[in-house]
Amino acid sequence: MRYEEFTIEGRNAVLEAFRSGKTIDRLFVLDGCKDGPVQTIVREARKHDTIIQFVAKERLDQISGTGHHQGVIAYAAAYEYAQVEDMLRAAEEKGEPPFLFLLDGIEDPHNLGAIIRTANLAGAHGVIIPKRRAVGLTATVAKTSAGALNYTPVAKVTNLSATIEELKEKGLWFVCADMGGEQMYRLNLKGPIGLVIGNEGDGVSRLVREKCDMIASIPMKGDIDSLNASVAAGVLAYEIVRQRLQ
């Protein structure tokens, strides 16, 4: 099911959006505002575990498309998020070992869209992103995915490390991309697997990396020492595809 991406502005409209079950990625609230209706919206957002940012009036004015935000603006997701269980069920229905992408803090919507496109073409059963410190399913992500978002489910989870632990109990192995790892061609990447790609600047976080079973490096011969996150995801994904086809 698709949602049109838009900002929801005004106290009544934002509160109704929460109560009607719309997928809200982020709530911007005027910093220091103690107004009763605004506090009601904040409580509603917390019940839904929505990310809340308290910002200056200048920031709200900048985001606003109408100029009548009344101290609150909500960002709705462009697409509905899936559940991780849906991805595992899809793999089972296809008779394939699960193949998932887990993205640790991807912040650029163009990178996220490109990775979702790669995931679809590589035959992955879904993409998992964290709720915080990462981009959500914006219109830019949808456009960059070139339609892949219509076919590849994306789940948003509170804790990526905990999700990895839960998936390990279901038989998945995890490999993350890191320059200090074993060359990817020497690793056995067959079977049920999760491919973990890190943040554009900092890579995979320490806590997530420690949960991974394998650390893969991509051989590089040039003068710089790293690839764009979406390119690295594509290179590693297709090594997994190559091994799965053997």
Image (tube, rainbow, N blue to C red):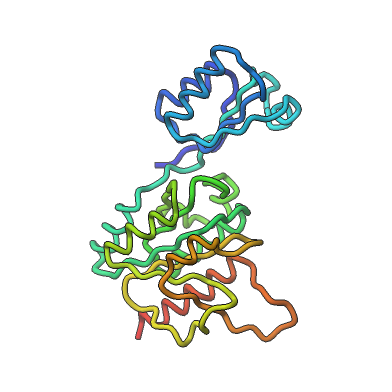
Q: Is 36 on the left-hand or right-hand side of 221?
A: left
Left or right placement of residue 151 versus residue 140 in this view:
left
Expressed as whole percent of the image width and height from the top left, the position of residue 27 reads 56, 31
Q: Residue at x 40, y 25 (%)?
A: 20
**Looking at the image, how many numbered discs can be counted on the residues?**
0
Q: How far across and how far down the image is residue 86, in percent?
A: 31, 52
Quadrant in which residue 31 is drawn: top right
Q: In this view, does 174 lie to the left or right of 25?
A: left
Q: Nearer the viewer, residue 2 or 220?
A: 220
**Quadrant assignment for the C terminus:** bottom left
What residue do we see at 46% from left, 66% from top?
210
Q: In which quarter of the image is the N terminus?
A: top left
Residue 123 position in % (x across, y down): 39, 68
Name the residue rendered at 50%, 18% in the picture. Answer: 40
Q: Where is residue 6 in the image (x, y as percent from the top left)?
A: 57, 34
Q: In this view, does 33 lie above or below 208?
A: above
- In the rendered image, which quarter is residue 227 located in? bottom right
Q: Is residue 110 above or below residue 137?
A: below
Q: Is residue 8 left or right of residue 208?
A: right
Q: Is residue 119 above or below residue 63?
A: below
Residue located at (56% from left, 50% from top):
134
Q: Nearest the camera: 85 or 120?
A: 85
Does residue 149 sit above or below 48 in this rendering?
Answer: below
